[in-house]
Amino acid sequence: LLKDVIKPFWIADPVNPLFTALFSALGLWPAVFASLLLPLKPKDQQLPAWPFVSASFFGGAFGLIPYLAFTKYAGKGEETVGDSGAASKLFGGKPNAIFLTFSTIVLIGLGIGLFAPNDLNGGSDYPVDVIFYTYLKNYPEVFLSSKLAHISTIDFFTLWALSFKPLLEDMRRRGWYSGDAFDNALLASFMGFPLLGACTWLAIRPPIPAVEKPPAPEEVVPETVSQE
């Protein structure tokens, strides 16, 4: 199945393009989590995020679950500190967010059949919705017949679920979430579209506001008494 996944979509008899898109999306999720987690390390936490984010590139959700299980955010943006390292700047930058969003849109197009050869029923002119329905109808067969498809599908939806906590905290940290009805609807809109919603947030999110430190108290210099 893995050989079929890496085949170009124009080769005859490829694997279900919906699974190809989902499997390819597993390579984007770790970059999304890097963009969300690296700037969100709580001040009082010694556990760094980068080893677990790195592990997620190879182990998917299994690499992130330990970190997210032991990380507790206080619900206040000012109680998190940003990582100023090169990796945080790379993954947190707008070019990376735009790349992730564009790549996700391409994968969605692949998954719904925009790039597929119209070979259903001998090449009849089927609209995209019929092609996508065919992919969706055949997906359970792929899911049940292949361990790779089984594990990849579960991993994708697990990563989607795990993104809720970092996404919420990132929105709060950047002043986009205060808990009212509009903010909850906005959060639901980002979470409602797997991967695409998180990538869209990364593309439009504002910079982390600088926390103003209170001015240091002025040092009082004792007056010297001159003796005549």
Image: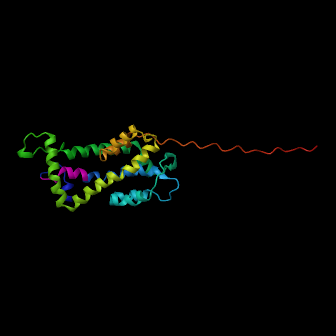
The residue lying furthest to the front in this view is 181
Q: Is residue 62 above or below residue 198?
A: below
Write the residue at 6% across / 46% down. Answer: 121
Question: Which residue is depicted at the point 25% across and 55% down?
Answer: 153
User: Splitting the image into 4 quarters, where does residue 159 fall?
Assistant: bottom left
Examine the image and state in which quarter residue 129 appears: top left
One can see residue 173 in this view: yes
Q: Which residues are magenta?
A: 13-22
Residue 14 lies within the magenta run: yes
Which percent across, then down, holds residue 190? 34, 43
Colour treatment of the image = rainbow
Q: Residue at x 22, y 52 (%)?
A: 20
Query: Residue 54: image x %, image y %?
Result: 39, 58
Magenta stretch, main secondary structure, is helix
Looking at the rendered structure, the number of numbered marks drawn on it comes to 0
Q: Is residue 78 magenta?
A: no
Question: Which residue corresponds to the image point at 25% horizontal and 60% vertical from the top-left?
Answer: 151
Q: Is residue 225 above or below residue 51?
A: above
- Horizontal side of 213 relative to 133 (left or right) equals right
* Quarter of the image with the C terminus in it: top right
Q: Nearer the viewer, residue 174 or 105?
A: 174
Where does residue 24 sit, x and y in percent of width and height?
26, 52
